[in-house]
Amino acid sequence: MSGRYGTYLFTCFDYPLLPPDTNDIERYFGATKAQLRHALGAASTAGSVAKNLGADYVEGFATAWLLPGEQLLQSLAPRANTDYDRAREEVRAAEQKATLRRSRRRAPARHISAILTEWLAAP
């Protein structure tokens, strides 16, 4: 196997822009999960905002991760409460399907009449 893959094992050293390991990526994703666990007070990030929003969450976290604190605060300062309310509503709408799916799994009796009505109305 080493003969077959040997020529490609260390190509990262031929390209200065390609890092030789994934330590920075692992550290970044570890930080996103740690931040979520802290914010949610949960031991797991399964079914959390990151899972529901995916790339949108990771991109937002990257902005906060890369900008120095003062520069981040300056970029957020001009935002009005209406911007925050609109963004919060977009997050709620994006998470709504996953929230309903989890709710149906956890307490199906609460949703059974709506499910039956929806099922019977289908052509």
Image (cartoon, rainbow, N blue to C red):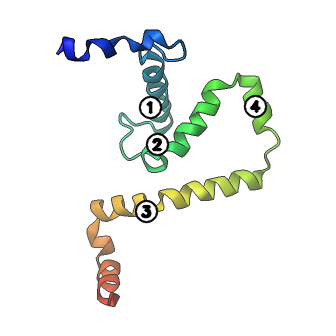
Report the amino acid beneath label 2.
Ala
Dividing the image into 4 quarters, which one contains the N terminus?
top left
The answer to whether 51 is drawn above or below residue 64 in the figure is: below
> Circle 4 is placed at which residue position?
73
User: Where residue 48 sits: x, y (%)?
Assistant: 42, 45
Question: Which residue is drawn at the image coordinates 57% and 38% (left, top)?
Answer: 59
3D distance between C-alphas at marks 4 and 2? 22 Å
Question: Which residue is drawn at the image coordinates 51% and 43% (left, top)?
Answer: 55
3D distance between C-alphas at marks 3 and 1? 22 Å
> Circle 1 is placed at which residue position?
33
The answer to whether 18 is drawn above or below residue 55 in the figure is: above
Q: Quick one: label 4, few (<14), some, or many (20+) residues within 10 Å?
A: few
User: Where residue 9 sits: x, y (%)?
Assistant: 32, 13
> Circle 3 is placed at which residue position?
97
Q: Earlier in the sequence, mark 2 or mark 3?
A: 2
Q: Residue furthest right?
A: 78
Q: Tell whether label 4 touches label 3 (CB within 8 Å).
A: no
Dividing the image into 4 quarters, which one contains the C terminus?
bottom left
Q: Earlier in the sequence, mark 3 or mark 1?
A: 1
Q: Quick one: label 2, few (<14), some, or many (20+) residues within 10 Å?
A: some
